[in-house]
Amino acid sequence: MAVKKLERYKMRGLINKDKLLLIAFLFTFISFWFLLPDYAINTISLSFCNGLVILGLLLLMRAGLISFGHGMYYCLGGYAVAMTYNFLQIKEVFVLIAFSVLAGFIVSFFLGFFVRRFRGIFFAMLNLALSMILFGIIVKSISLGSTDGFGIKELTYFNHAIEDEKRLNIFSYLLIVILTSLMMMIVMTFLKSPSGKILEAIRENEIRSSYLGISINKQIHKIYIFSSTLAALGGGLMVILIGHITPEDTAYWTRSGEFVFVAILSGSLNVFAPLIGSLFFEFIRSYALFYFPNTWQMIIGVVLILGILYLPEGIGSIFNKRKK
Amino acid sequence: MLLEVKNLNKKFGSVSAANNINFKMNENEIIGVIGANGAGKTTFCNIITGYLKPDSGVILYEGKNITKFNVQEIKNIGIHRSFQIPQVFENLGVLENIIITELVAKNKQNALFEDAYSKKNYQNAIKLLEKFSFDVDKFKDKTVKELPQGARKVLDILIAIIGKPKVILLDEPTSGISTDEKNVIMKNILRAIKEFNISVLFIEHDMEIVEKFSERVVAFYNGEIIADDKPSKVFNQNNVKKFIIGGL
């Protein structure tokens, strides 16, 4: 019966191989809560928060762009959660998440009018500059927490206070895994749609795209907002997971560089790649730090070189075949 | 009158690329544009399609002033173009190039809830390619960068035709193509274009092609139009022989 139903959904195009894979991905990671030790669950959760930023970068990469300043939106999302919590005394997780998404959306909407006119290295560096401006503003403002940042304490889920005092509990884990999977589903649907394919046309040939009647700047603006909002959501979830945010951990250029590093390592072939890439990076970093505390950056560098040599299209190319 | 250009001027520094150009085009006309390199043919094409703005002069399309229109606006009113160097989506497949073009032509570039590369869209793309005598079986599974020059040229022109424009500007449609293929390609393209009632302005260096396929010829020299008449008359003008086709 269930098989027949599934076949019917397949026929209508409601379920395809990628969506089934995503559902399997979701349930696998939910089951990990019961199977893996705390440190692994913590690494997975943090990877997914960062993975959302990489997912945002994937969208830009589809249009042939890269941002060296996406840490800015990660920071904005995180600060939106932390400041709403501290200044408005709102403890409800879903409201806090809504504030982080809203912060990313509004700021990227306005900055988008400016950055959408630039391409290539200019686009990348402009975002880096904006990120460093935000970093400078926060560091020099006592009211914004300066270098100490902000912390948050107990949270509520649908007005229900959590008794578990640990930041990483089943609720925060499920929230991160489910929201991440939902975003992957949205991005996957978007990339398959005409709207998503237009990005590939822009990346391939901007002149022809213009002559087809595509408004390039508007399309780039749209994708910039989408991408930045995902990064802000990642930042918001990270604060809920860790309970603290500082400008140095989010808006400083090294953080944005790390996101670009993982984005290159992951590639832009499919929506699983950013999350797998982010997980891979966090585990490599954890083990490298543990076994080679003084030379862990070298290990990371070697991994990137191997990735470029053997997987030039990124980790995603392992399980992505060109479809005809 | 479909398209009219009045007193058009464009300078790049001290070089005059368009010098007081006056030009008229009627519906369903096929006009060949000739001229030596640097005569201003492509600049003329770029100005009409909104890629370059003229220093002065007016462009009227169906009586409407379109001088300040940008590339997208020009495309949306029905003036399309192909390029001297094919402007296609190199790393995408042949069918994907057609599908994306069709989606934009159907104004679906912002559609979110449909599969762009659906079976139906692939079938439509194949039908369209067959209509233009494109060797579908040979090329449909290839990316554009794997195509020979002739096929790339045809694809570029096909992309320009999708969306059924009223005017199409073809910039050297047979450049880089072998002599044997030139006639076949031009015949196929113009047959399909005629079917859609599209007016054609094509820039060409091969005088045989121009003579064979155009109803009217416009000759450019140093940013000026030095002749505008039927092919037989233009080719017999002394200044055309002297500056463009040789033999004087």
Image (spheres, rainbow, N blue to C red):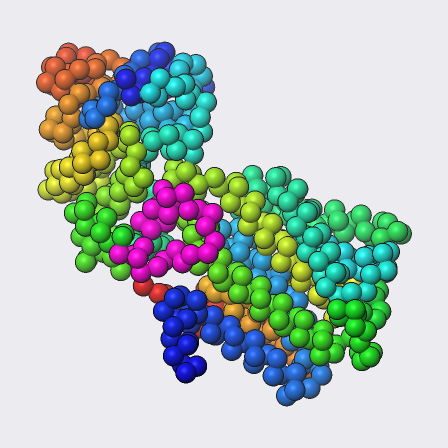
- In the displayed structure, B135 sits above or below B64; it is below
For this orientation, the residue located farthest to the bottom is A35
Please give left or right for residue A251 compared with residue B90 in the image.
right
In depth, the one of A5 and A220 nearer the eye is A5
Q: Residue at x 49, y 62 (%)?
A: A188
Q: Residue at x 38, y 72 (%)?
A: A8
For this orientation, the residue located farthest to the right is A142
- Residue A282 visible? The answer is no
In depth, the one of A301 and A249 nearer the eye is A249
Screen quadrant of the C terminus of chain A: bottom left
Q: Which residues are magenta?
A: B97-123
- Residue A324 visible? The answer is yes
- In the displayed structure, A268 sits above or below A172; it is above
Count of numbered labels shown in the rendering: 0
- In magenta segment, residue B110: yes
- In the displayed structure, A127 sits above or below B50; it is below
Could you tell me residue A99's position as x and y percent?
73, 56
Q: Quadrant of residue B2?
A: top left
- In magenta segment, residue B237: no
Could you tell me residue B193's position as x and y percent?
20, 35
Q: Residue at x 11, y 28 (%)?
A: B212
Screen quadrant of the N terminus of chain A: bottom left
In depth, the one of A204 and B245 nearer the eye is A204
Q: Residue at x 35, y 65 (%)?
A: A323
Could you tell me residue A39's position as x and y percent?
71, 82
Please give left or right for residue A97 compared with residue B247 in the image.
right
Please give left or right for residue B182 compared with residue A323 in the image.
left
Q: Quadrant of residue A87?
A: bottom right
- In the displayed structure, A290 sits above or below A118; it is below
Please give left or right for residue A149 compared with residue B85 in the image.
right
Could you tell me residue B100's position as x and y percent?
37, 49
